[in-house]
Image (cartoon, rainbow, N blue to C red):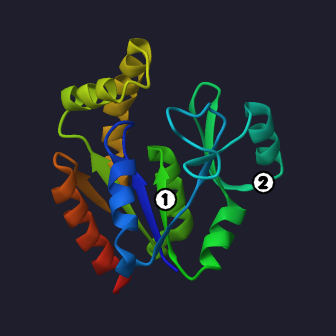
Amino acid sequence: MKIIVFSAPSGTGKSSVIRELLKQTDLNLAFSISTTSRAPRGTERDGVEYYFISAEQFKEKIKQQAFIEWQEVYAGNYYGTYSSEIERLSAMGKHIIFDLDVFGGINLKKYFGEEALSIFLQPPSLEELKKRLERRQTDTPEKIAMRIDKAAYEIEQAIYFDKVVVNDNLQTCVEEVSQLIRTFLNH
């Protein structure tokens, strides 16, 4: 079992890239479902995109050391990876792909070391990122401004990842990332 970690500022296209990668059956990937204390957005469903729990439940799980990694990404919004989720997926004999915030990705890479490939997806520009977030229509203008401010800081963290891929065209990005993963899995 190997670990593939994707991190990027919100709106960069991690979910779209991962969705395409999961269709490539030769990669033998399984998606690790993260846990969050935020409310579902749009059509998100519990147990599919995330496990949704309250902030109080999340804090209790932290005390129980149920997470392999966790972060308070925004005030009161926690995200983490259950240790049991990794056990569930590794029992399937699959390589595990993660969609994590930037600091969660850095922490998971530290934890797994050479067994993990960490990929930072970078937007073509902050202006393009803002347009993507606006097109999603899931956040208020204030939330979008907050995400853009955070994105500038997160992009500075790209140096802590094994590979950086700019997502300016989904198909090109998926092809580049697929090749990186194949190379990693074959070593």
Q: Residue at x 17, y 45 (%)?
A: 168
**Crowdedness of circle 2 by 10 Å Cα count: few (<14), some, many (20+)?**
few
**Crowdedness of circle 1 by 10 Å Cα count: few (<14), some, many (20+)?**
many
Label 1 residue SS: strand
Query: Which residue type carries mark 1?
Result: Phe
Q: Residue at x 29, y 27 (%)?
A: 135
- Of labels 1 and 2, earlier in sequence is 2
Taking 182 as reference, is 167 left or right? Answer: left
Q: Residue at x 53, y 59 (%)?
A: 108
The residue most toward the top is: 142
The residue that disc 1 covers is 98
Q: Is residue 139 visible?
A: yes
| Depicted 150 relative to depicted 28: above or below | above
Please name whichever residue, 27 or 3, is drawn nearer the observer in this view of the structure: 27
| Depicted 180 relative to depicted 123: above or below | below
The residue most toward the bottom is: 187
The residue that disc 2 covers is 65
| Residue at mark 1 to residue at mark 2: CA–CA distance | 19 Å
Query: Which residue type carries mark 2?
Result: Gln
Q: Position of residue 7 (x, y in %)?
A: 40, 50
| Depicted 177 relative to depicted 169: above or below | below
Q: Quadrant of residue 139?
A: top left
Residue 156, labelled with which disc? none
